[in-house]
Structures are given as structure tokens and as C-alpha cells.
């Protein structure tokens, strides 16, 4: 992983088990900051499961995709109606100073006409947040996910079933988390796979380790610095004959500098700037040597309104797993050289039970290698949610994405996805 922040974001142990209100704020922020190839494929829009103790639930989604296979502009598009039925269960249990959690979601995806895409999906995660009476704390987590792949990835064109599978193990150890000076060691191993050989070039395996120091000058300002090492490969990147492939191996070294600043109770800034050196063994023309990083600004001008702005610059391999394990998103294969993005997400609580969300984003991906070129993906999403009760919620959302390119590795397309859902979560 390329994100050396604490590997598990701690859930508030005293959070009320409600579906509405501010739990949706986090979900909107995640959606607005998704990577360039964020899916608009059938997914449960997000089940709010914060709270203490075990829970069980179910949801039903009905949606329509105007361009199911994300075919290039000027060719016949395939629209279809789809249905996603989900069952979910989990637990969030504090045990003394520790916290144990596990979440599982099983989905049945069915299409009205394009039945070759009928499939099953799942999302599984488990973890442990721990701390001692001394200065040590840390986390362990595991995530596994299977979902219908985004048919816009990699410039491929097919109407065959393609399942995306991702797994990740993460761990970190922190000394002095609440002290002025602290240190952190973290590591992860990740794997991304596709069932369809046409997407073989997007498969990715990588491991990463980080060692760094933290310095908190005040309650409002914290600095960090460290080094990060990543080894990875696209195991099936180059075609090597009928049904066989050759790998593309890479090494990455980063020197990271981070800042967290909370100037007021209504505003917070998180920034990372990295000196990045990524080299590819079989194809040096893909090497990246320069600056990467991200800047996120959260601004809440009132109790009802939240605005989140994110600017990022990252390598394709570095961006692939950034959203894995967060609500409503999945890993998406990205083997571009550099992806630069801007995201804006706004959430407004109309009432205590009704909220509206809007997200805008644009991402430019630059391709390395012999072909080169670039593509720009523009995205828009609007959603409205209603918490009928503490256990029952409804919502609808519309999302549009439009891509333009000057590279032979990609193509122009546009697609619109509309869905509505109902859900119930019991504790």
C-alpha cells in the first residue's frame, strides 16, 4: 500500500446505531474521493453499520445502466435493468482496550436481459485494533472482495462475464500515538485478479512496508516523515503466446512527508508529499521519478453541511488498492504511469432523517511505454437518502461518467447509472 497512515480507521465506539444522519457523510466522502476508475456497476450504495455489538441486515437495489459494457462512443450501447439483493452481518465489539470487528456482505446480482452477467459478489473484512497500558498500539486487518468488474478498465471491449477479486492483509505498530514524538511501522500485501483473460494486464500483486516518525507540535498540528518500500508485479502483463503471459515487475521507493492540520473545529487538512522513484524491470520506459501525493480538505461551515475536496497525484499501481475495504467502492485495475485527480463532495442534511449528496470529479491518466498518450475521466453523482427509522432506510442516486482520450490504450465513452434501494439493519 502506498498510504502509510494508520491502517485501520477506528470506528467511534459510542456511535449511535442509526442509518441516517452523519453516517452518510462518510459514505459520500468516500464516493467523492474514489480513484479514476471508480465503478458505476451494480453495488449496494452503502450500508451504515456503525454501532456496538452484532448486526444483521438486508438490502435490495434496482437500477438501470445506459451503457453496461462501457463501449466506445459511436458504437451500439447495451442498456439494462439490474437487481442486487444483499445479506449482511457483522460485529463491532470492544474488549477492554481492544476492539474486534468483522463485516460480511453477500450479494446476488441479476440482469433483466444480459443474463450472462448474472453473478454472486461478496465483501468480507475483519480486524483488531489494540493498545497497551504503555505507549504501544496498532491494528491488524484482512479484506477480501469479489464484484462484477468495471467494463471500462484497460481499454478492453467484451460482453463476457468478468469478475474482479481483491484481497489484502494490513498491519501497523505505533509507539507514542498520544505523545509529542512517536514512531510507526506498517506493512501490507495485496492481490488483484480478474476472471476474464482479456483483463489479464490489470492483475496486480504487491507488498509494501513503511517506517516513519511522527511529531505533534500541538493538538491542531502534526507532522510525519518516513520511507516506504514497495515491490510488485503485473504477473500477466505481456502476451507471450496463446493463453500465456509474461510479467512486468516493478520496485518503488518513496520518501514521505505528511501534515495534519486542524485550524478550527469546522476545518481540517491532511496532506502527503512523496519523492517517488518507481522502476520497471522489463520496460524502463514506464519508470516514474518525481513527486506524488494527496491533499484533502474537510470543511463543515454548519452542522448540516459538509464539503470535502481532494487533490491527488499517484502512480497507477499506487492508486489501485487505495479504496479497498471502504464502503461502496472496490479496487480497480490501473496500470497507467501517473493519475492526477480532483474531487469535490458535498453533503447536506435536509432534516435529521433526510440527506442529499453530490460529487464531482475529474481524473487525467498518463500512459507510459511505447504507446503513451492520456485520458480524462469526468464523473458526477447525486444521491438522496431517507432514514425511515433507526433500522430502515431508502435512497436513490444517479451517476454519470464521461471519458475522452488521445491514446490507443483507451477509448471515448459515456454512461449513466440510476438506482434506488431499500435496506434494513437490525441490532
Image (cartoon, rainbow, N blue to C red):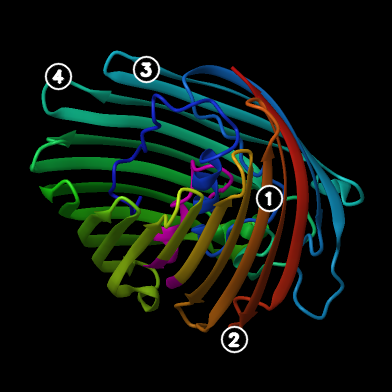
> Tag count in the figure?
4
Helix, strand or loop for disc 1: strand
At numbered mark 3, what does the secondary structure look like: helix, strand or loop? strand
First reached walking from the N terminus: tag 2 or tag 1: 1
Q: Position of residue 99 (x, y in %)?
A: 35, 21
Disc 2 element: loop
Q: Which mark is residue 175?
A: none
Q: Nearer the viewer, residue 411 or 127?
A: 127
Q: Nearer the viewer, residue 102 or 270?
A: 270
Question: Furthest residue to the right?
Answer: 113
Instruction: State whether residue 335 appears in this view.
Output: no
Q: Position of residue 234 (x, y in %)?
A: 47, 57
Q: What residue sits right under mark 2 in the picture?
A: 406
Q: Residues within 10 Å of mark 3 (few under 14, many from 20)?
A: some
In this view, 97 is above or below 245: above
- The part of the chain drawn in magenta is 311-340
Percent coordinates x, y for residue 408 in the rendering: 61, 82
**Which mark sits nearer the N-terminus, 4 or 3?**
3
Q: Main SS type for the magenta part?
A: loop
Q: Which residue is mark 3?
A: 94
Q: In whole angstroms, how far apart are the C-alphas of marks 2 and 1?
A: 36 Å
Q: Nearer the viewer, mark 2 or mark 1?
A: 1
Real-space Cα separation, disc 2 to disc 3, in angstroms: 52 Å
Please indicate whether residue 56 sits to the left or right of residue 184 in the image.
right
Few, some or many residues within 10 Å of mark 2 (<14, 14–19, 20+)? few
Q: Nearer the viewer, mark 2 or mark 3?
A: 3
Find disc 4 in the rendering and name its residue.
Answer: 133
Q: Which residue is mark 1?
A: 384
The residue at 17%/36% (across/down) is: 177
Between disc 4 and disc 1, whose residue precedes? 4
Amino acid at each position: 500500500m502506498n498510504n502509510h497512515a494508520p491502517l485501520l480507521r477506528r470506528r467511534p465506539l459510542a456511535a449511535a446505531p442509526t442509518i441516517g444522519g452523519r453516517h452518510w457523510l462518510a459514505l459520500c466522502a468516500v464516493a467523492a474521493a474514489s480513484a479514476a476508475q471508480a465503478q458505476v456497476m451494480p453495488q449496494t450504495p452503502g450500508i451504515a453499520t456503525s454501532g456496538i455489538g452484532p448486526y444483521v441486515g438486508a438490502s435490495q437495489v434496482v437500477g438501470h445502466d445506459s451503457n453496461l459494457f462501457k463501449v466506445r462512443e459511436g458504437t451500439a450501447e447495451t442498456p439494462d435493468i439490474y437487481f442486487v439483493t444483499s445479506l449482511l452481518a457483522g460485529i463491532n465489539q470492544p474488549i477492554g482496550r481492544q476492539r474486534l470487528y468483522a463485516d460480511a456482505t453477500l450479494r446476488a446480482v441479476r440482469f433483466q436481459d444480459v443474463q450472462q452477467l448474472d453473478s454472486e459478489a461478496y465483501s468480507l473484512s475483519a480486524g483488531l485494533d489494540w493498545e497497551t497500558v504503555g505507549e504501544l498500539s496498532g491494528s491488524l486487518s484482512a479484506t477480501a472482495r469479489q464484484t462484477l468488474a468495471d467494463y471500462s478498465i484497460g481499454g478492453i471491449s467484451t460482453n463476457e462475464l468478468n469478475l474482479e477479486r481483491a484481497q489484502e492483509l494490513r498491519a501497523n505498530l505505533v509507539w507514542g500515538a498520544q505523545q509529542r514524538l512517536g514512531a510507526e511501522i506498517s506493512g501490507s500485501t495485496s492481490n488483484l485478479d480478474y476472471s476474464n483473460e482479456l483483463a489479464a494486464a490489470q492483475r496486480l500483486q504487491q507488498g509494501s512496508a513503511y517506517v516513519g516518525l511522527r511529531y505533534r507540535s500541538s493538538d491542531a498540528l502534526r507532522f510525519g516523515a518516513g520511507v516506504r518500500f514497495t515491490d510488485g508485479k503485473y504477473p500477466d502483463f505481456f502476451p507471450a503466446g496463446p493463453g500465456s503471459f509474461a510479467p512486468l515487475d516493478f520496485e518503488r521507493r518513496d520518501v514521505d512527508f505528511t501534515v495534519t492540520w486542524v485550524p478550527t473545529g469546522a476545518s481540517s487538512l491532511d496532506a502527503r508529499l512523496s519523492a517517488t522513484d518507481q522502476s520497471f524491470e522489463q520496460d524502463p520506459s514506464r519508470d516514474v521519478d518525481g513527486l506524488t501525493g494527496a491533499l484533502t480538505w474537510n470543511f463543515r461551515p454548519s452542522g448540516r453541511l459538509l464539503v470535502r475536496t481532494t487533490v491527488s497525484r499517484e502512480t497507477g499501481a499506487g492508486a489501485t488498492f487505495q479504496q479497498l475495504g471502504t464502503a461502496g467502492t472496490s479496487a480497480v485495475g490501473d496500470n497507467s504511469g501517473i493519475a492526477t485527480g480532483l474531487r469535490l463532495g458535498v453533503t447536506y442534511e435536509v432534516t435529521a432523517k433526510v440527506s442529499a449528496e453530490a460529487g464531482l470529479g475529474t481524473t487525467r491518466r498518463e500512459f507510459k511505454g511505447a504507446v503513451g498518450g492520456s485520458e480524462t475521466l469526468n464523473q458526477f453523482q447525486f444521491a438522496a437518502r431517507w432514514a425511515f427509522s433507526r433500522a430502515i432506510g431508502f435512497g436513490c442516486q444517479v451517476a454519470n461518467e464521461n471519458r475522452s482520450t488521445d491514446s490507443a490504450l483507451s477509448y471515448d465513452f459515456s454512461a449513466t447509472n440510476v438506482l434506488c434501494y431499500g435496506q434494513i439493519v437490525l441490532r
